Image (cartoon, rainbow, N blue to C red):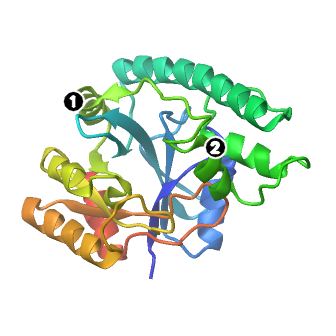
Amino acid sequence: MVYADLHVHTTRSDGTFDPSEVAPAAADAGLEAVAITDHDRVQPDLPPVITRAGVELVHGIELRVETPAEQIDLLGYGVDPTDDLRDELDRLQRDRETRGRRIIENVEEHLGVALGIDSREGIGRPHVARAVVDHPETDYDAVSGVFDDLIGDDGPCYVARDVTGYEEGVRLLRESCGVVGLAHPLRYDDPDAALARASDLDAVELHYPYDRPVGKDPMNAGVERVRETIEKHDLLATGGSDAHDTELAKDGVDEAEYDRLRDRL
């Protein structure tokens, strides 16, 4: 049973929840706790942990960082942002806005349509993909197809981001968060290289709905390697739905796992 969903996105980045809707939706889903983890953004005026709608709401963040192997995502929990973190997030949002504009232009030119969306703070590729699916003159009926054909990392309309370096990202999150962990390790091209970073961190995302994995190994073998990494380094096990829509509790942690995380916060 999922006790806490610790990976949820809102309209502050590329989700569909308004931030104010997350706690009530979590209560409706039978959760005891939920974390907002928007991409490269913190929530205004949200304490590290607070109770809303009878649910513990954890202030989190998902930060993409650059390693020699590839880009990976870090999850910070119990955010109380420093000025240094805010400055870096401001830089990343400017880069996101520029990149979003270029991706929109690329897709419109490639498909010969006007998508009718503008780049803005917090924009991500899912926004563009949804606009393509919703457009009456395209043949796409699923966001995944847009990623596969157009805006995935190898797609003709892809534009790279100028992300934070790994060491700098860990430093910024450690100074601002109670717990710093590795997100969805089996979604990377090289899961072993990503998991090798775990010794620098506090946690690894063990529970995750791998409906679109990037990693090349079978999921059952991969999950066992994640468990072994957690045990080897005495890490916290985290997890969540990675919700970009309004469906919560697809995955997450049990009560004992959440209690360990909560104690650290």
Comparing 15 with 50, the one in front is 15
x and y percent of residue 67 in the render? 25, 35
Q: Name the residue under label 1.
A: 167
Amino acid type for the residue under numbered disc 2: Leu
At 67% from the left and 48% from the top, the residue drawn is: 20
Which structural element holds mark 1? helix
At 28% from the left and 72% from the top, the residue drawn is: 223
Amino acid type for the residue under numbered disc 1: Glu
Quarter of the image where the N terminus is located: bottom left
Comparing 163 with 207, the one in front is 163
Query: In the image, which is nearer the foreground, mark 2 or mark 1?
Result: 2
22 sits to left or right of 253? right
Q: Distance between the residues labelled 2 and 1?
A: 31 Å
Q: Is residue 133 above or below residue 26?
A: above
- Using the rendered view, name the quadrant where residue 141 is placed: bottom right
Residue 14 in sight here: no
Q: Mark 2 points at which residue?
A: 150
* Among the two numbered marks 2 and 1 on one chain, the one whose residue lies closer to the N terminus: 2
- Using the rendered view, name the quadrant where residue 96 is placed: top right
Residue 208 in sight here: yes
